[in-house]
């Protein structure tokens, strides 16, 4: 010290990086207060030591925010981080899914399939689809059966179309095929009886009509074209 001397000491406030990672099947944005994070576009920025940063997650349409991890944050509310070190926080967004369940009913049998794929009932009668998916169900009766119609989330006997905004349950009813007589009333001498054998041309044909809701009709054997097949 040979003369008066002035010395300046410079001090700065430390700053640390806050980084946000987005995960999951859904989409959304994360913003911060104070400003700096807009993730979306900017997912990392630095804040001064001791700054309390509040992160807010906003899911996109069709997605849900399912929670935070890292930085001491959990749950689905806001995430508050005190910046005393570099910190990484993850925000998880998912696309909701809902179950579509098909139940087969009735005395008949058949299968139900879906577009998009997932239901093949038969084997797979329940599947999950993402929110707002439009699912079309198609019923195919087995041989000897008929498709009667839908119950639950669908009605009628055409294709069943449901929009998956919630869990859905559909019933497909199959019946057993029946024979319907259409040649009523019979006209003597002109109405055809169809093919028959000598064993079933007469009384059996007449006896079936009242049971089918058709009027009775008597005819003599001369009105029927009786044929005898070889060996009968």
Image: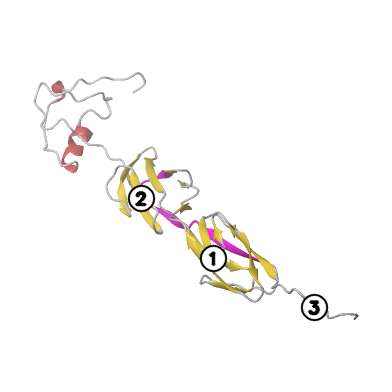
Disc number placed over residue 6 in the picture, else none: 3
Compute the Cα span from label 1 to label 3.
Answer: 39 Å
The majority secondary structure of the magenta stretch comes to strand
Q: Name the residue at 65% across, 73% down.
A: 83
Q: Is 216 located above or below residue 189 in the figure?
A: below
**The magenta stretch spans residue 64:** no
Q: Is residue 99 magenta?
A: yes
Q: Position of residue 72 (x, y in %)?
A: 63, 74
Name the N-terminal-most of marks 1 and 2: 1
Q: Which residue is mark 1?
A: 35
Few, some or many residues within 10 Å of mark 2 (<14, 14–19, 20+): some
Choose the circle earlier in sequence order: 1 or 3: 3
**Pointer 1 local density, CA inside 10 Å: few below 14, some 14–19, many at least 20:** few
**Upstream in sequence: badge 2 or badge 3:** 3
Residue annotated with mark 2? 162
CB within 8 Å, label 1 to label 3:
no
**Decide: marks 2, 3 in contact (CB < 8 A)?**
no
At mark 3, the secondary structure is: loop
Position of residue 217 measured from the top left corner of the image (x, y, whole percent): 11, 33
Q: Nearer the viewer, residue 213 or 100?
A: 100
Residue 209: image location, x then y, percent: 17, 38
What residue occupies the far left of the structure in this picture? 188
> Horizontal placement of 196 versus 135: left or right?
left
Looking at the image, the residue that sits furthest to the right is 2
Residues drawn in magenta? 88-113
- Where is the C terminus found, in terms of image quarters? top left
Mark 1 vs mark 2, CA separation in Å: 43 Å
């Amino acid at each position: 010290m040979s003369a008066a001397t002035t010395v300046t000491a410079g001090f700065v406030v430390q700053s640390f990086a806050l980084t946000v990672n987005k995960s999951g099947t859904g989409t959304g944005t994360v913003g911060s207060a104070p400003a700096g994070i807009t993730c979306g576009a900017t997912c990392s920025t630095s804040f001064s030591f001791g700054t309390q940063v509040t992160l807010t997650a906003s899911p996109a349409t069709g997605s849900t925010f399912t929670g935070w991890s890292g930085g001491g944050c959990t749950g689905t509310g806001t995430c508050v981080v005190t910046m005393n070190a570099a910190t990484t926080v993850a925000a998880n967004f998912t696309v909701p899914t809902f179950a579509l369940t098909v139940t087969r009913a009735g005395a008949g049998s058949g299968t139900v399939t879906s577009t998009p794929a997932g239901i093949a009932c038969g084997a797979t009668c329940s599947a999950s689809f993402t929110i707002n998916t439009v699912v079309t169900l198609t019923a195919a009766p087995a041989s000897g059966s008929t498709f009667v119609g839908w119950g639950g989330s669908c009605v009628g006997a055409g294709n069943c179309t449901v929009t998956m905004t919630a869990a859905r349950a559909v019933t497909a009813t199959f019946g057993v095929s029946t024979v319907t007589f259409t040649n009523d009333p019979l006209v003597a001498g002109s109405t055809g009886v169809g093919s028959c054998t000598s064993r079933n041309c007469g009384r059996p044909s007449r006896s079936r009509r009242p049971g089918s809701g058709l009027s009775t009709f008597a005819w003599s054997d001369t009105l029927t074209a009786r044929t005898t097949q070889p060996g009968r």
